[in-house]
Each structure stands twice: as structure tokens, then as C-alpha cells.
Image (cartoon, grey):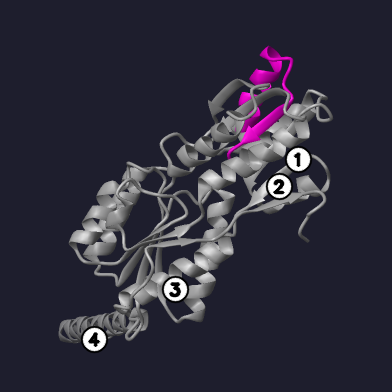
Amino acid sequence: MLRKKWLYVIILFLLMISIGWVGFAFFESDQTYKKEDAQTEGKYRIGVSYENLENEYVKGLQRAIQQKANELNVTIIEKDGRGKAENQVTQVENFLFDKVDAIILNPYEKDGTVLAVKKAKEAKIPLIVLSGEVENLDEATAYVGSNDIVAGRMETELIANELGGVGNVVILHIQGGSSLQISRDAGIKNVLSQYPNIHIIAEQTANGNREQGEYVMEKWLQNLPNIDAVISQNDAMALGAYDAIKAAGREKEIHIVGIDAIPEAVKAVEKGRMLGTIFQDSEQQGFMAVEMALKAAKGEKIDHMNYSPFRIITKKSYIK
């Protein structure tokens, strides 16, 4: 009886070992399959670092990049900088470590991502700067975007014409230190310098954020009764300003302009809630960035500066 009991124990032990080896072999096989399945043999790999995917315009860039990468059979590795230049520097360093074929950098700050561009150049990996300049742009392989000084001029000229060259304006800035903020501000101030009877009575950063734009506008409405217009450096803040103005019952008194032509802003223009917005073609920029990155990865010659034009959208020129 005791001998049979031990025999059962031995058989059970051998059976457990056998099952374990089968399970281990299955696990190993499954892992190997996944590794092989994840390989993108023959495909070019492009790392993409976005400044902040909470931004509607940046989401538009992402959609365009994904679409063009799919069309060109390119693998993209996407990372969100979440509004921090240091995150983007780390992301670019990781792309270089992973030996990607090219990088697209949509920078949050003009100065903060200088190191990322420098390291890519040292590693001899093509880097395309997208929709926002960096201080050492000459070290990047190419730039794809728009001339943001022009955008600032266009929205300000729209306001100046509406006011007849006379009035009080407030300015909402996107994040300080970004090339977009610096360039758009230069364009705004350039136009206003030509209108001595249009006065800037307040200007403040709202970081390109709708809620912050609304908050800043609420404070201005409480302390500055004679506001004729809001010049916003992007549409999100312009929409936030409108929310505050509407809550104060002054939507018929104050004109608002923005930049980017995100869908909600275009609708606001159509409905007369905003005077206008400046259309910046995120689709064209995203497409171009992928095309340029792929050409550079293949060693083909590309232009260093690649601009897509802005266009004014008003209720009269509304694009459906």
C-alpha cells in the first residue's frame, strides 16, 4: 500500500514537471511570436515628440502625421511632451537610443528643446522641427510650419479695421518662451505700432488654455470696463474669453480674434461669436513633416525652411 502511494506521488510529480515544461514552452513561443510580430522589417521608423496633445491644433497635427505615415508605410513612435520641454529632450534622447531613422519634433519652447536638436545632429539622425521654432533651428535638418509673425499681423489688422483704428484692446498670450508666442506677439505689436489710437490696456499669458483664458478675461472684465477687443494668440484662449464675455452679457460689445481655426472657433466665427480666426493648415504641415522626415532618412536632399500659408476666416469668408 505504501509502495503504491509513493508511486502515485512520483507519477504526479512527473506530470507536474511535464505540464510546467509545456507551459513554459508555450509562453516562450508566445513571446517569440510577439517579438516577431512587432518587427517592422523594411520599414522606416520615425520618432515624433508632440508639445502637448491637450492642444487642439497639436491633435490635428497628430491626425495628419498618422494618416501620412500609414500612406507611406512608415512606422511612427509617438510621445506626448505634456507641455514640458524637458520631457521632449528625454523623448528625443530615447529615440536616438532606439536608433530611429528620423525624428519629428513639435517643440513646446524655443530655448528648452535646444539640446534635443543638438543631440540629434551629433548622432547624425535627421530631425524635422514642426510648427514651432527652436533657438538653434540652423542645426535641425529642416523646419515645417508657418511664419507666425504673419499670423499675429493678420489677426491684428482684422481688429484694427473693425475698430476703425480707435479703441482699447487686451492681448492673451500663449505659453511664454515658445517661438509661437514670441513671433505672434511681434506681429501684433508691429501692426498696433501703426495705430496710435488703439491702446493695449492689458496683456497676460493664459498658456494657450481655454479655462485660463476665461479666468483672465473674467478678471479684466471686472477691472477694465472699456475693452473693445480681445487679440488672442490662439483659438482656445479666444473661446475661453468669449465664455467670460458672454457670462458678463457683453458679447455684443467686444470683438474677439484668434489663431489656428480649430473647428469650434470656425463655428464661433460662423455664428458671429468671434470676429475671425487665422487658418493654419495642420493637415498640410503634418503631411509635409512626415514626407520630409522620410526623404531625409533616405538621404535625399530637402529644403531647410518649408512654410504653409495662413488664411483669414471671417463670417464672410467662412469655409465649410
User: Is the residue marked by circle 3 packed among few (<14), some (14-19), or many (20+) residues within 10 Å?
Assistant: some
User: Is the residue marked by circle 2 packed among few (<14), some (14-19), or many (20+) residues within 10 Å?
Assistant: many
Which secondary structure, mark 2? helix
Q: Which residue is mark 2?
A: 265
Q: Which residue is mark 1?
A: 274
Pointer 1 or 3: first along the chain: 1
Where is residue 62 drawn, in percent x and y? 51, 61
User: Which residues lie in the magenta part?
Assistant: 213-233
Task: Give 66 or 254, whichever is nearer the viewer.
Answer: 254
Q: Is residue 281 left or right of residue 135?
A: right
Q: Is residue 138 left or right of residue 81?
A: left
Please tell me whether mark 4 or mark 3 is closer to you in this view: 3
Q: Which residue is mark 3?
A: 291
Which secondary structure, mark 1? loop
Pointer 2 or 3: first along the chain: 2
* Amino acid type of the residue tagged 4 in the rendering: Ser
Question: Mark 4 to mark 3: distance in Å?
Answer: 54 Å
| Quarter that holds the N terminus | bottom left
Q: Are marks 1 and 2 in contact (CB under 8 Å)?
A: yes
* Amino acid type of the residue tagged 1 in the rendering: Met
Residue 151 visible: yes
Magenta span contains residue 75? no
User: Is the residue marked by circle 1 packed among few (<14), some (14-19), or many (20+) residues within 10 Å?
Assistant: many
Question: Mark 1 to mark 3: distance in Å?
Answer: 35 Å
Residue displayed at 24% across by 63% down: 96
